[in-house]
Amino acid sequence: MSQRVQDAAAFIDTTLQNEGSWYRADDVENRVDGALASYGASVGAIRGTVRDATRKFKDLDHDEVTALASVLWGQPGPGRRPVFERRLAAVVLLQSRAALLRHSDLTRVEGFIRTARTAELVSPLVADVVRPLLATLKGKDRQRAETVVGRWHQDPDEWMRHAATLTSGITAETA
């Protein structure tokens, strides 16, 4: 991973921690049944932080955007729980750079959906990342993506089936 991606992740993480409050952190952790840690940053602060990061680290390319999203989605350190605000920042980053995404990125997004643990992350991932991506794909890339999403309908994981339901109709809308 590039130093630039590491620096961008550190900037986002530090800023989100500074924007947090204990009462919002408690609320988030209760809503997700303790599956994720929380810094207690507001949605507005998360969006602003990602905006500031993309201004500070200009012209992030496809590989840097996807690597940064993966870093944010993961654990902030060994033995620590993933953090809700970092994950939402990854979603916001992907939303803001959706035009860079390719059909092959569905695999990464699928991993995010499987480990999201809350509709508060799955729903915007599907609505603002997966659906726009599917809408732009053509030809073989479109077929490959439809195969992936079709598999989600039969998946034993409840979040994958939920995501598949949220994508229903996209084929008919854009075909």
Image (cartoon, grey):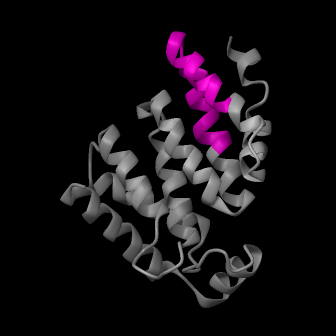
Residue 103 shown left or right of residue 21 in the figure: left
Expressed as whole percent of the image width and height from the top left, the position of residue 120 reads: 70, 59
Q: Is 131 colored magenta in this rendering?
A: yes
Residue at 60% x, 65% y: name it: 43
Expressed as whole percent of the image width and height from the top left, the position of residue 169 reads: 78, 24
Q: Is 171 colored magenta in this rendering?
A: no
Farthest residue to the left: give it.
3
Residue at 37% x, 77% y: name it: 14
Number of disc labels: 0
The N terminus lies in which quarter of the figure?
bottom left
- Tell me the quarter of the picture where residue 39 sits: bottom right
Q: Main secondary structure of the magenta part?
A: helix
The C terminus lies in which quarter of the figure?
top right
- Tell me the quarter of the picture where residue 44 sits: bottom right
Residue at 66% x, 49% y: name it: 124
Closest to the observer: 26 or 150?
Answer: 150
Expressed as whole percent of the image width and height from the top left, the position of residue 100 reads: 41, 33
Residue range of the region highlighted in magenta in the rendering: 126-149
Residue at 61% x, 90% y: name it: 22
Closest to the observer: 100 or 71?
Answer: 71
Residue 135 shown left or right of residue 11 in the figure: right
Q: Say if 167 sits above or below 123 in the image.
A: above
- Tell me the quarter of the picture where residue 171 sits: top right
